[in-house]
Amino acid sequence: MAQCVMPVGFIAPYTSLPVLLPARLDTFESLLLQITLADVLALAFFVAAWFGYTRYADREMGAARGIRALMHQARLEWGRQMVVREQRVLDAALTGHLINSVTFYANTSIYIVAALIATAGALDSLLNFAQDLPFASRQSRLLVQAKLLLLISVFVFAYFKFTWAHRQYTLLLTLIGATPDRSRAPDVLEDHAQKSARINTLAGDEFNRGVRSYYFGFAALGWFLHVALFAALTALILIVLWRRDFRSPTMRALAR
């Protein structure tokens, strides 16, 4: 009786799984042993500051304050002016400029991620550079890899925010093209103006979240040198963002 022989290439991926899983578990356990309590606290503070501030700054329009609320009112006025204009060339041109800005940041994010991945391939040089600094703490190769992964994640997150903002601005261009004739009923024009302003603000929010990721990316760089610097830079970035959004001269000028 003929025997059924499975191809070696078909069996190999399945037979290698039991070998790979323990190795990965050992790597994870080694990383946990190398991370100190200070690292855990600083990382928790970093994540809480980043996403907590985003939740605080990007509240619903009824509770929004600072530059975001003021700019939403400006966008609403833009929408109301748009629906009564005979030609919307100016509105399309302004939105096109916004799209160009978002595209620049999205492309830059890709370059940064590529550079960080290349840095991971030259990890020995990075370790030697960090160890030569007098104020940098000693750290293992595995811990530096984890820090690089955090930094890559920050800029990948920024890329997704910028690309979503880009898509929302293209939707806004569609709304500009679909603007009803100015002879239509006032409630129809007001509804379109409100809708356009809302999409404009949502796109602006995504763009701001992407830019905010850049700020916190600079804070994450401090972790490569010392955990105390990581926490200090996170707190500094939080203060800078809050002051610019709620206490800056720009905000006061917009409020006048």
Image: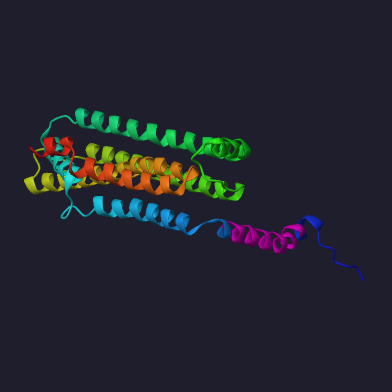
- Vertical side of 129 occupied by 12: above or below: below
Residue for point 21% across, 55% down: 60
Rendered residue at 72%/61% (across/down): 19
- Measured as percent of width and height from the top left, residue 218 is found at 40, 40
Q: Residue at x 60, y 40 (%)?
A: 123
Frontmost residue, 86 versus 197: 197
Residue located 60% across and 48% down the image: 140
* Residue 57 in the image, given as x and y percentages of width and height: 24, 50
Dominant secondary structure (helix, strand or loop) of the stretch shown in magenta = helix
Would residue 34 be seen by someone viewing this image from the given angle? Answer: yes
Give the farthest residue toward the front: 134
Q: How many marks?
A: 0
In this rendering, would 82 be left or right of 144? left
Quadrant (top left/top right/bottom left/bottom right) for the C terminus: top left
Quarter where residue 101 is shown: top left
User: x%, y% of residue 17?
Assistant: 70, 61
| Quadrant where the N terminus is found in the figure | bottom right
Q: Can the viewer see residue 192?
A: no
Q: How is the image coloured?
A: rainbow
Residue 207 drawn at (x, y percent): 32, 41
Magenta stretch: residue 15 in it? yes
In terms of depth relative to the viewer, which is nearer, 184 or 85? 85
Residue located farthest toward the bottom when viewing the structure as drawn: 1
In reply to whether residue 168 is colored magenta, the answer given is no
Q: Which residues are magenta?
A: 12-31
Q: Is residue 15 above or below residue 193?
A: below
